[in-house]
Amino acid sequence: MQTEIKISSETLNIQACIDWVMLPESGGIDVFIGTVRNATKGKAVLRLEFEAYEKMALAEMEKIAAQALEKWPVQKLLIHHRTGVLAVGEVPVIIAVSAAHRDAAFEACRYVIDTLKQTVPIWKKEIFEDGEVWVAAHP
Amino acid sequence: MQTEIKISSETLNIQACIDWVMLPESGGIDVFIGTVRNATKGKAVLRLEFEAYEKMALAEMEKIAAQALEKWPVQKLLIHHRTGVLAVGEVPVIIAVSAAHRDAAFEACRYVIDTLKQTVPIWKKEIFEDGEVWVAAHP
Amino acid sequence: MKIKVLAFGIAKDIFGNSSVNMELANDALVCNLKYTLEQQYPRLKQLSSYMVAVNNEYALAEDTIHATDEIAIIPPVSGG
Amino acid sequence: MKIKVLAFGIAKDIFGNSSVNMELANDALVCNLKYTLEQQYPRLKQLSSYMVAVNNEYALAEDTIHATDEIAIIPPVSGG
C-alpha cells in the first residue's frame, strides 16, 4: 500500500509514521505535525475537542491522498488524525510523505494539509476558561 | 535559544528534534528528513560518506537559520547534520521548524534545506560496488 | 418518506442531538431538506456555511434524496 | 609568506592530503592562490567549480590573503 489513512482517539506516534513512509528508495521525507496551540487570537485555550464524521472523513482523506499521488511523484503518503480531547502540545494531525526528491515530498505534504483543512469533515472545538466555540462555524 | 545547529557523527534522533522545536505556542511543525537512497541514476549505492568543514559549516548553517528567522515568523528552528559513513535508510539531515501558522514552517523549512545544499561546506561521497564518486564534483 | 439526518460539530448543538428524523416528500432535493431544516432550526442560517453529505459525499443543492441515503449536515470543517 | 591550505572532499583526494603548505607573495590575492594551486594540481581545473574560504567565509577572487588566515579549498558542496 502506498497510503495509510487513519483516524484515532489514541496518541499519534510520530516516529512510527516516519518509519512507515521511509523506503530504501526514499531521498527525502517531509512531515507536517499539527500541534494544539495554547492561545487563539490572544485568548488562552485550555484544550481542544475533535469530532469526526469518521466514514466520510476517511473517504475524503483517501481522495486527497490519491490526488497527491497523481500530482507528484511521491512514494508513500500517510495521514493520521486524532479525535477526542487534546491538551496543549498534543498532536491532532501528522502527514508524512516520502519521495525520491524533496520537492515532491514538500509540495504533496503541503497540498494534503491545505486540502484536508478545507474538505475533511472533522471539527474542532476550542475550550476557553469562560466558554467554548466551534472553530470557523460562524462568520 | 531559537535555533539549534549541530553536526554529529552519531545517529540523529528525529523525535528529540521535534520535541526541541515544539512550544505551547506552536500551531504547526514542518520537518524535513533526508534519507540515504539505495540508488542514484539507476546505479546501486552501497553507502554514503559525509565530510564537513565543521567550523565553517556550522557558521553557514547559523547564517541560513538567521535568514529564515528574518524572512518568516517561525518560533524555533533546528538543523542537525550527520558526518561519517551512512548506510541506506540512515538519516543525514533533519530540519525542524515550528511556527504559530503552518505556512511559515513549510516555507522556512524548504528554504533551509534548499540553501543548505547550495552553501554549506559538507561533501557526500557515493560508494558503489565498482567505485566511488564525490557528488557534484565534476560537470 | 422518513429520513434520518446525522449532525456533527455545531449542528449537533443546534439540533440538540447527534441526529434528527424528518418527514420529506419522496422526490425531495437537498435544497428542500436544507429549507425544511432551517425552518425548524433557524440557527443553521447563522453558520458561515454548511453542506449536506449524501452517502459520504458532498451533495449539490439539486441532488435528489432517497429514503435509503445516509444524510449528514456538515458545518464548516476545522480539522488539522 | 608561508600559508597552509585545508582541503575537503575531492580536493583532499587531489592534494593527496587534508592540507598543503604553500609559499605565496605577501600581497597575494585569492585568485593568485588559485592560479598557483592549479599549476601544481591541474585536476582542480576539472572540477565543476570550487571556492576558497578565508577564515570560514567564502572569499572573492580579489580578496587579499594574510599569513594568519585560515584558508580552505571548497569543492562543490553536496550536503543534505
Image (spheres, coloured by chain):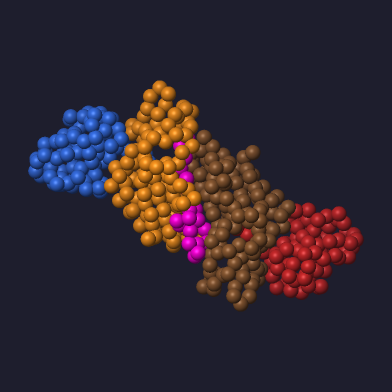
Chain colours: A brown, B orange, C red, D blue
Q: Nearer the viewer, residue B36 or A14?
A: A14
Judged left or right of residue C23, residue A13 is: left
Name the spot of residue D41 as percent of width and height, x first.
Answer: 21, 29
Decide whether residue D59 is among the magenta residues: no
Locate the C terminus of chain C and report the quarter of the image it occupies.
bottom right
Quadrant showing the N terminus of chain C: bottom right
Most distant residue in the bottom direction: A130
- Residue B26 highlighted magenta (yes or no): yes
Image quadrant in which you'd find residue C73: bottom right
Find residue A113 and report its image quarter.
bottom right
Name which quarter of the figure residue C54 lies in: bottom right
Measured as percent of width and height from the top left, residue C64 is found at 83, 57
Rendered location of residue B18, percent (x, y): 48, 53
Drawn side of residue B78 relative to residue C35, left or right: left
The magenta-colored residue range is B18-37
Residue pictured at 44% horizontal, 29% vertical: B46
Q: Position of residue B89 (x, y in %)?
A: 49, 37
- For the point 46% across and 31% down, the residue is B40
User: Would residue D78 appear left or right of C22 to someone viewing this image?
Assistant: left
Q: Is residue A127 above or below residue A78?
A: below
Q: Residue at x 60, y 55 (%)?
A: A11
Q: In the image, what residue occupies the spot 51% across and 38% down?
A: A26
Q: Viewer-proximal residue, B67 or A29?
A: A29
Q: Is residue D70 above or below residue B30?
A: above
